[in-house]
């Protein structure tokens, strides 16, 4: 299964590997799910994980290893949809890729994706994702 993974879920999974976002990272690392990215999404992942507070809390190896895994194993996509109107403009690439590939977007910030702005995209929380798809093989 392919998903678009919001940065907040990636970071939360690294902060608490035993929580629900951590389970999603486990599924990703095990190859049970694949994450769709484009250059904008990958740049955001990289920029966020390079912030001083994350550099202090995560060893370089851990940050680099997840980024390299995503770079080499992620589904590199191009958008075929243009989105212009979201509360947080930084979320636009995530929605565009999810819409373009017709895959779910997993985010901890559901309020950033109002129903009247997401077209036909399936936006789901980490808990809902695990509840519905967590048993993937």
Image: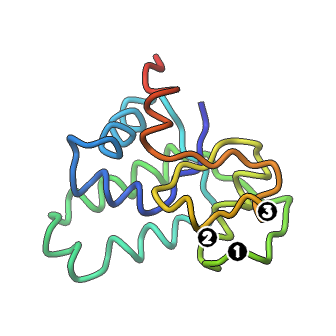
Is 22 situated left or right of 53 in this image?
right
- Which of marks 2 and 3 precedes in the sequence? 2
Q: Could you tell me which residue is drawn at 67 percent across and 67 percent down?
A: 93
Dots 2 and 1: beta carbons under 8 Å?
yes
For the residue carrying disc 3, how many other residues have a C-alpha within 10 Å: few (<14), some (14-19), or many (20+)? Answer: few
The x, y position of residue 113, in whole percent, is 65, 63
Q: Nearer the viewer, mark 3 or mark 1?
A: 3
Residue in the foreground of this view, choosing between 52 and 107: 107
Q: List the residue tagged with mark 1.
A: 86
Is 95 situated left or right of 12 in this image?
right
Residue in the foreground of this view, choosing between 2 and 21: 21
Q: List the residue tagged with mark 3.
A: 116
For the residue carrying disc 1, how many other residues have a C-alpha within 10 Å: few (<14), some (14-19), or many (20+)? Answer: some
The x, y position of residue 67, in whole percent, is 39, 58
- Which of marks 1 and 2 precedes in the sequence? 1
Q: Nearer the viewer, mark 3 or mark 2?
A: 3
Q: Is residue 87 above or below residue 61?
A: below
């Amino acid at each position: 299964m392919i998903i678009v993974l919001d940065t907040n879920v990636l970071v939360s999974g690294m902060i608490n590997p035993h929580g629900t976002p951590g389970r999603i990272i486990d599924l990703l690392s095990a190859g049970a799910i694949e994450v769709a990215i484009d250059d904008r999404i990958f740049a955001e992942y990289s920029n966020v994980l390079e912030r001083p507070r994350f550099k202090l809390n995560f060893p370089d190896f851990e940050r680099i290893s997840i980024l390299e895994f995503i770079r080499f194993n992620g589904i590199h996509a191009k958008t075929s949809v243009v989105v212009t109107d979201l509360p947080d403009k930084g979320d636009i690439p995530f929605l565009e890729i999810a819409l373009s590939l017709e895959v779910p977007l997993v985010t901890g910030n559901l309020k950033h994706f109002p129903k009247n702005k997401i077209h036909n995209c399936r936006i789901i929380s980490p808990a809902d994702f695990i509840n519905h798809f967590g048993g993937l093989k």
